[in-house]
Amino acid sequence: MQDVALASLAQEAGLQVEWFDFNGTARVVSPDTLRAALLALGLPSATAGDIAESRQRLRKPAGGDFVVTEAGAEIALPGRRLLLEDGDVRDVSGDGPLLIYRPGYHRLECDDRIVTIAVAPPNLPDITGLTGRHRIWGLSAQLYALRGSGPAGLGDFAALSDAARAAGRAGADILAISPIHALFLAEPQRYSPYSPSSRDFLNPLFAAPGVGREPEGGPFIDWPRASAARVARLREAFDRFEGDGDFERFVAAGGAPLAGHALFEALHGHFHAQGIAGGWPDWPAAYHDPAGPAVQAFAREHAREVHFHLFLQWRAARGLADAQSAARAAGMGVGLVADLAVGLDSGGSHAWSRRDELLHGLILGAPPDAFQAAGQAWGITGLSPTALQRSGYEPFLRTLRAALGPAGGLRIDHALGLGRLWVIPDGAAPLDGVYLRQPFDDLIRLVTLEAHRAQALVIAEDLGVVPAGFRDRLAERHLLGMRVLPFERGGSGGFTDSAHWTPAAAAMTSTHDLTPIAGWWRGIDIAWRNRLGFEGDTQARRAADRQRFWDATGTGAMPAPDEPAPVVDAAVHQVARSACEVAIVAIEDLVGLEEAPNLPGTIDQHPNWRRRLPDTIDGLLAAPATARRSMLLRNERPK
């Protein structure tokens, strides 16, 4: 009976007790997994008494002072006065239904409280509405991989400005970049852009210091060496900095969250220098409480170091804004498209300062699918849906606004997580996870509202095990899905004609987790997987796929496996001519590179997040093969 009660509580809390895998096989989640997930939601379930108490706690109303709706929807709240965001005041004490057509955050005065009402528009404008152009194209690049005009060990926002100018001159409207969230400055070996310390602040290593010189890096970034050189240059700039009004305004606008992040970075550097690696759980217990006396004493005694980290955030934020200005000045209709990582490190800045917002004891991942037969465990955590609803979605809005920043668009990594997250108890295998339902309707409305206010394009990564109807819900609001060329197949495994791909989507040649087209044609990914003992495609299956690919995209005789150049041309042309409003070509594909930025399932076995581009974007675009592919994009999507 207790297992029945446990399953009932789990379902009420948003856990999917039964699910179907990518093969259509029915699966049942184990009681141990359910108990671990419930505990992370603040709902103990070890005994029958725990279950009864958790059920009562779950049924208490939460977040009643914040309502999310959409324009024109009936709002069932008895109010007296409506205070619209623009200052207008309406008497709503009559008997008729309350209807609000104006998007924004409005306040309703009720008899006993004031309720904030977030009103989203029904959808975002299409690309024509955003840019005045019917079909646009752009490039994607890993920011760290960019080469600037001078010697440097890794890319930065100055190199991004140069890249944006070059891409704009080539006719692109978009430059999509890898995540730029704050990592751990004192631990440069933790350089995965998808495992941030905080998504609300920036990686200061991308701030262009503007003084001194750094040793030029080779084809791979040596993160500890490059980081040490970059931080040394930034400290030189800080030592010469005398302060100005813009910096003071930035710090004041950032308020307590920015000050807390700077304090975390100073503490993390302090303890790391003492040989205490890892995040805040490894610090002495007195420093676990951000408001505790030990932390406050540290802040006073190390005020200059805290000030340095505030300076770094200011330099990074101004560099990012300059890069977007450069993109728009170069004629880009959208400019930079930032990338919002799906989760964050449980030992980082966000978890230290606001740990009640997160899912403790659970990590995010994905169940087994056709791409990863063993499933995935990403080593990160995410926002708790109960905490979101309790706080009026403040953590989500803060992160969303930070990610949009000055950019012209946003890619939401693993957007399936807006509807449900695959959560795995610490130490368990990916298969032993459970789907946790998210407040999808509210989240998708808030994304629409914030993008509307920023007049930004939104790309929602809809890859993996996609729930029925999910893509339709995105399309209704004109949030663009992703149509990635290697995945666009028919029932028989053949590649589909891109003329029939979804219009409200971004067509792409590949992603950061895929081998570029040239490497796929050569079988570079198969060689890597064989070398590491991973399951995956065989050479026989790849030979059949080459034929399918060429049948769908190419003309004439099929090139040999060691002749990828015409195949890359055909792939770029297939994406360029697609029905999708947006076409994005990875710079690796435009150039014809063969190695992937990242190989999922590896950390040190593959040089993840370390490969540098062989030249500046300007230089790469001038090469004959790259110029030919750029012309394919311009011809299919003229301005």
Image: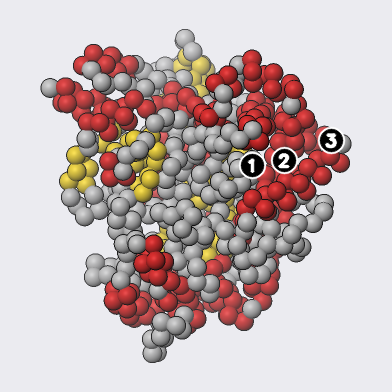
- Mark 3 is surrounded, within 10 Å at the Cα level, by few (under 14), some (14 to 19) or many (20 or more) other residues, namely few
Looking at numbered disc 1 in the image, what kind of residue is underneath it?
Leu
Q: Which residue is mark 2?
A: 312
Q: Which residue is mark 1?
A: 185
Q: Residue at x 31, y 20 (%)?
A: 44
The quarter of the displayed image where residue 163 is located: bottom right
Q: Earlier in the sequence, mark 2 or mark 3?
A: 3
Secondary structure under tag 3 reads: loop
Q: Nearer the viewer, residue 60 or 146?
A: 146
State the CA–CA distance, disc 1 to disc 3. 23 Å
Image location (x, y in percent) of residue 106? 54, 27
Please name which of the two marks, 2 or 3, marks the residue nearer to the observer: 2
State the CA–CA distance, disc 1 to disc 2. 11 Å
Q: Residue at x 32, y 16 (%)?
A: 57
Check whether the beta carbons of the residues at disc 1 and disc 2 lie within 8 A of each other: yes
Q: Which residue is mark 3?
A: 243
- Mark 1 is surrounded, within 10 Å at the Cα level, by few (under 14), some (14 to 19) or many (20 or more) other residues, namely many
- Res 211 label: none
